[in-house]
Image (tube, rainbow, N blue to C red):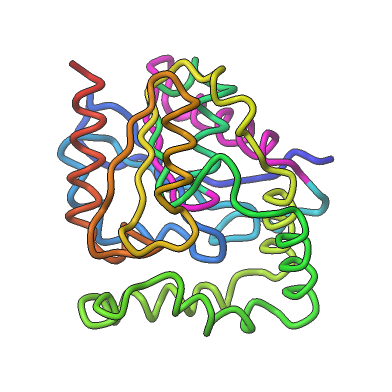
Amino acid sequence: MTAPEITLTEPVGAEGRPLLVLGHSLGTGPLLWENAVPLLVGDFRVSLLSLPGHGTAPVPDGPFTMAELAESVAGAVRGIGGCAPAYYAGVSIGGALALHRALDHGDVFAAVASLAAGAELGTSEHWLTRAETVRRQSTSVLIGPSAQSWFVPESFEREPVLIGRILHALRDTDDEGYARCAEALAGYDLRGRLGEIRIPVLAAWGEHDTVGTEARQDQIVAGAPRARKVRIDGVAHQPPAERPGATLAVLREFFTDIQK
């Protein structure tokens, strides 16, 4: 195994505010949060994560686990956040990373929000097959199915430009980078360890999401002692792009409540 390289943008926002790191879903990138960031910078210093082989992050040269990916992010956050614990919110694989950070890096993160995710996200066979398919046919083969499962039809009317750019980002994601992340998800299953999490966790799901379903959020809430769940209406699997205002209202309420 090799330590996967990620990148974090320089934080933007009001000085003295808590650091909030935002993670994206597999095959997208930081642009997933583009319309949401302006709504956050008054309350937080915001930094955007790029996963291995996505955006500005290097393509990994070997396999890695989700735990190792979480360690890479925690180390990078220590570098830009100083001693004060940070907040984190991520979507899909980014949401899975939220749970890993809550489990292993509670000293770095004061609270995390897992969006459109779960303590597991499908079978090992599913993700290994996905990695093999992408290596053989490229990420382009995923565009059609992803467009259908990621967004509700109304989102294409509300955010046509951003959604088009997100689907282009999927096409342009490095095939090996995507495959390595998929292989990391093949070994991801925290269902038996949720009880070890000691920091607050928000488990949020989209009303029409077929991946990060309510049942998966119920697992998190049943297992993690300080977890709570909330539904984001009118979205599927990419809440920050589909309804940034509603998504940020959920996050702001959660993180603000933690600060009290």
In percent of width and height, residue 121 lies at: 59, 51
- Residue 40, quarter of picture: top left
- 42 is higher (above) or lower (below) than 105: below
Q: Residue at 49%, 65% (x, y): give it.
A: 28
- 185 is higher (above) or lower (below) than 42: below
How many numbered circles are shown?
A: 0
Q: Is residue 125 magenta?
A: no
In percent of width and height, residue 217 lies at: 43, 42
Q: Which quadrant would the N terminus be assigned to in this image? A: top right
Along the line of sight, the residue nearer the viewer: 177 or 117: 117
> Visible in this render: residue 124?
yes
Q: Is residue 67 magenta?
A: yes
> Visible in this render: residue 10?
no
In percent of width and height, residue 191 lies at: 60, 33
In percent of width and height, residue 65 lies at: 73, 41
Q: Residue at 18%, 16% (x, y): give it.
A: 260
- 114 is higher (above) or lower (below) than 110: below
- Residue 182, quarter of picture: bottom right
Q: Residue at 76%, 75% (x, y): give it.
A: 133
Q: Residue at 74%, 44% (x, y): give it.
A: 187
Which residues make up the magenta segment? 64-93
In the image: residue 239, left or right of residue 135? left
